Amino acid sequence: MSSVSPSFFEVVSYTPPDAIFELTKTYNADPVARKVNLGQGTYKDENGNPWILPAVRSAKEKIKDSNHEYLPILGLPSFRTLAADLVFGKHSAAIREGRVASCQALSGTGALHIAGTMLKQVLGRDTTVYITKPSWSNHRQVFESIGFAVQEINYSSSAGVDMQSLIQTLNEAAPKSIFVFHASAHNPSGWDCSPAQWKQIGAIVKERQLFPLFDAAYLGLTSGDYDRDAFAIRYFADELGLEIAVCLSFAKSMGLYGERVGMCAFSSNTPTITAAVESSLARMIRAEISNPPAFGARIVAAVLEDEELYAQWRKDLVTMSSRIAEMRWQLYQGLAELRTPGDWKRITEQKGMFCILGLTPDQVHYLQKEYHIYMAESSRVSIAGLNGSNVRYVAECINQTVKR
Ligand SMILES: Cc1ncc(COP(=O)(O)O)c(C=O)c1O
């Protein structure tokens, strides 16, 4: 046998696996029947099963004879038009005046990557990206992988949004800094800004010429009303007339996790700028993935373009958001009835899929080892993993763990 040449890959150091995906893997491998996964933020129905939304089920039936040709580089045209109308609002001046550039993206994460890559060309590599602390675990690495310096803004405490710190950071950041805002259902804190707080933030963003990027992964799922959840985006784009980026995902709002369907959109000042931005997006996509996947985009378009399916989807959003709200309430009630030491009221005050329970890493490990209840080490739980048959058990186990 000839001798082995030195490896080209010796410079590569080992990267530990992603904590949340690893947690799901450990959960799946756990043979115990009475186990609960509160780690990954995917919606489950009241029986603990993944839920195919009725609107999506019907849409799949409608598109079943579609061909398998390539989509255009920027994505399925009807999907892009309908998704932009959905998020900006049909009556948006930015839409009416042709000032929204968009492209289909590989779900919310892909949209963040495209938006970041575009903004690096526009604002330069010395721009700082501000993300919230805490934030979704992937934000930092998405923007650092593009080459940006990432800084954190103190966003929340156990009592709600820390407006004072947020405003201070907005006032101190260099002009043109990028601020990654969670449009609704802040992950992981569950604390959202009120419309009045968004107005305060918007005024500073405008005055100080900062760039707002909205991560819109949970629109519709937060309150059950898409328009209401899109308030901040529409306020910044239309009322304030700002140039913004929107990174939209249909993973949560349509339950299309594996289809990787999303959109990256920029509102800008003129249709001419918009055309140039869109052409640049097309160049980026051609170089990166050539053209996006068709299946998920066809499903979304079929739901949004059909009056009946659209009405059904609005109901589906209410079904998901009300089940999450009900589970928040039942978990809180369980802990309160058991007189579990701690401040649990916030579970019902926070919004969206997630909430941070405020347990120590030791308590989190104990819950996993002793009771087979899985959650992130920060004690962030996905409320959608709770249901009628496990919520009381989870409350009892948390109670036992806290009182230990
Ligand atoms: C805040 C936030 N942004 C973006 C995403 C992206 O999700 P996806 O790429 O699956 O659409 C997620 C997913 O959990 C999220 O929580």
Image: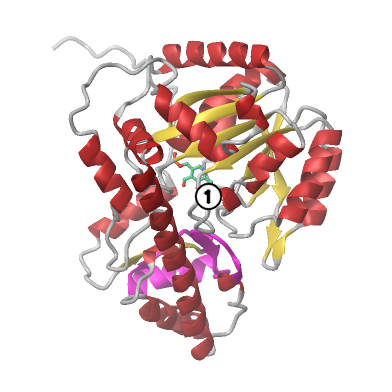
Looking at the image, the residue that sits furthest to the front is 307
Q: Is residue 74 magenta?
A: no
**Image quarter in which the N terminus is found:** top left
Callout 1: 10 Å neighbours few (<14), some, many (20+)? many
Instruction: Please say if 259 is above or below 332.
Output: above
Task: Check disc 1 and give the amino acid type.
Answer: Tyr
In screen coordinates, is 14 left or right of 189?
Answer: left
What residue is at 81 percent from the left and 30 percent from the top?
A: 209
Instruction: Please say if 210 is above or below 119.
Output: below
Percent coordinates x, y for residue 255 in the rendering: 36, 48
In screen coordinates, is 142 left or right of 382?
Answer: right
- Considering depth in this image, is 325 or 152 the residue closer to the camera? 325
Instruction: Please say if 138 is above or below 336.
Output: above
Q: Which residues are magenta?
A: 349-378
User: Quadrant of the rendered structure where residue 394 is?
Assistant: bottom left
What residue is at 61 percent from the left and 21 percent from the top?
A: 98
- The reply to whether residue 287 is visible in this rendering is yes
Percent coordinates x, y for residue 133 in the rendering: 66, 50
In screen coordinates, is 256 left or right of 335?
Answer: left
What residue is at 67 percent from the left and 30 percent from the top?
A: 93
Residue on which the image places disc 1:
226
Percent coordinates x, y for residue 74 in the rendering: 44, 18
Looking at the image, what colour scheme do you see? Answer: secondary structure
| SS class, disc 1 | helix
Q: Is residue 352 magenta?
A: yes
What residue is at 75 percent from the left and 39 percent from the top?
A: 239
Percent coordinates x, y for residue 261 in the rendering: 39, 34
- The reply to whether residue 404 is visible in this rendering is no
**Cβ at disc 1 under 8 Å from ligand 1:** no
- Considering depth in this image, is 12 or 239 the residue closer to the camera? 239
User: Quadrant of the rendered structure where residue 66 is?
Assistant: top left
- Considering depth in this image, is 171 or 96 the residue closer to the camera? 96
